[in-house]
Image: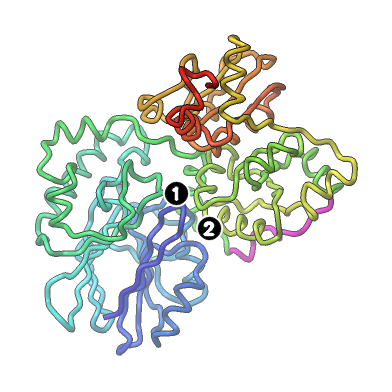
Amino acid sequence: MFFRQFRVEGLGCYSYLVGCPRAGVACVVDPERHVDRYLDAAREEGMRITHIFDTHLHADHVTGSLELARRTGAAIHVHPAVEAGYEHVPARGGDRFVLGAAEIEVVETPGHTPNSITLAVTDAARSREPMMLLTGDLLFVGDIGRPDLAGEDLLEEQVKNLYSSLYRTLSRFPDWVEVYPAHGEGSLCGKGMSAKPMTTLGFERRANPLLAGMPFEKFREIMTAEFQARPDNFAVMVEKNRKGPAPLEEAAAVRRLSADEVEAARKDGAVLVDLRDAEAFGAAFIPGSLNIGLRPQSPNWLGMVVEARERIVLIAHSDADAGAAVEQFRRVGYDGIIGSLDGGISDWAARGKPLDHLPQLSVFSLAHVLEKYPDHVLLDVRTDGEWESGRIEGAVHTPISALLKDGIEVDASRHVTAICNSGYRSNIAGSFLKARGFAHVFSVIGGMTAWENARRAGGLVDGRPA
């Protein structure tokens, strides 16, 4: 039997190619939108992709199932409750598929979504017992799938389903069975996933508190508590995945845009997303731009700030960065990227176009500002947990997810400095406030990490420069 795991960095998505080179057939489980990796791997092993499985209706990324089916002719298998609007074969509990030495059984495991399945994989060349479980978003390494994505009205039912799937349905499988989830570290589909790409059922039963014999009432208490904010584009991706996403070739062509074309697009309502790092953005940016620095997790942050249906213009250091962003953003449903600024900010400035700036304060400059101007607003945009672990006296706490959703009750004429843990989120927050009319906004380079290091080194004493 052949088995390979694939990972999308940042989003934490895992997908799988399972098959039998001797029989020349294979299946792909939970494919991402860019499918060449599966086609190349199957070709290298002399296998033809004949089946495609989605373990559930994905909310955090656009499925590659239809893209892969168009290019291979393979059948797509999803649970009937997905109510898929494209050609597919329903996958029901007990269904079995034989791909040479690889044998797959569909196990119904609702909870993360009402339509979730797990695939039990047997290597028939070695044993008649399942070797591994492809658990989708039911069970992760060190965590389990969140039950709230299907909606508030289904939460109670989903919590019960989740508990039943974990404690009853999976009980038939022994401890030594391997577990391969659909997500790992970086995903928003759980709370605290490990960076490790796989685990065993027995280890999770011993070390994962949510699977280690937890009583249902305690389980329910945890699973109905607040989860990490989900980007607004999750609902758009659910709808795309239910209907069937359009082929990538139908997405808008991304081209280099002149400064005049960018200006016209901005006036026509396009959103300008600046991919540069915090310091470069802070020095000079096109007014109204949002700073989403190019990193593996950029798609999640874009989803927090920009609606997936918007038309987008990218501002980048290079064409390579713009191309990388297009690939990342299309994974999460942003098909309206119309182009990138040719020549970047340098060309924009050379043509005499308007520019704004977001001053970047060192922690020592921040200490001077707070000492001299007691009415200065220090806006801490970290999570609740980060805030509880330590803060600067007098800071106002508004997690960035809340800021992006509801704004802040501060007069736009006030001087505001945003701080996070490293300087990345504070620049998102600063650009967001600037775009909404705040004239005097600053961001702290290095964030709370730099503040604490300066304090330990003796450069700051009681929040003041030494």
Looking at the rendered image, the quarter that the N terminus falls into is bottom left
Residue sitting nearer the eye, 102 or 301:
301
Residue sitting nearer the eye, 22 or 457:
457
Disc ID at residue 60: 1
Mark 1 Cα-neighbour bin, 10 Å: few <14, some 14–19, many ≥20: many
CA separation in Å, label 2 and label 1? 14 Å
In the visual, does 464 lie left or right of 93? right
Whole-percent x and y of residue 182?
34, 57
Whole-percent x and y of residue 270?
72, 42
Q: Mark 2 points at which residue?
A: 245
Q: Do the residues labelled 2 and 1 touch (CB within 8 Å)?
A: no
Identify the element where label 1 is drawn: loop
Q: Give the range drawn in magenta.
A: 248-258
Residue at x 50% of width, y 45% of height: 300
In the visual, does 426 lie left or right of 219? right
Residue sitting nearer the eye, 331 or 80:
331
The residue type indicated by label 2 comes to Pro
Whole-percent x and y of residue 374?
58, 9
In the visual, does 134 lie left or right of 403? left
Q: Is the residue 374 above or below the residue 64 in the image?
A: above
Residue at x 60% of width, y 43% of height: 292
Residue at x 27% of width, y 51% of height: 138
In the rendered image, is residue 401 in sight?
no
Disc ID at residue 323: none
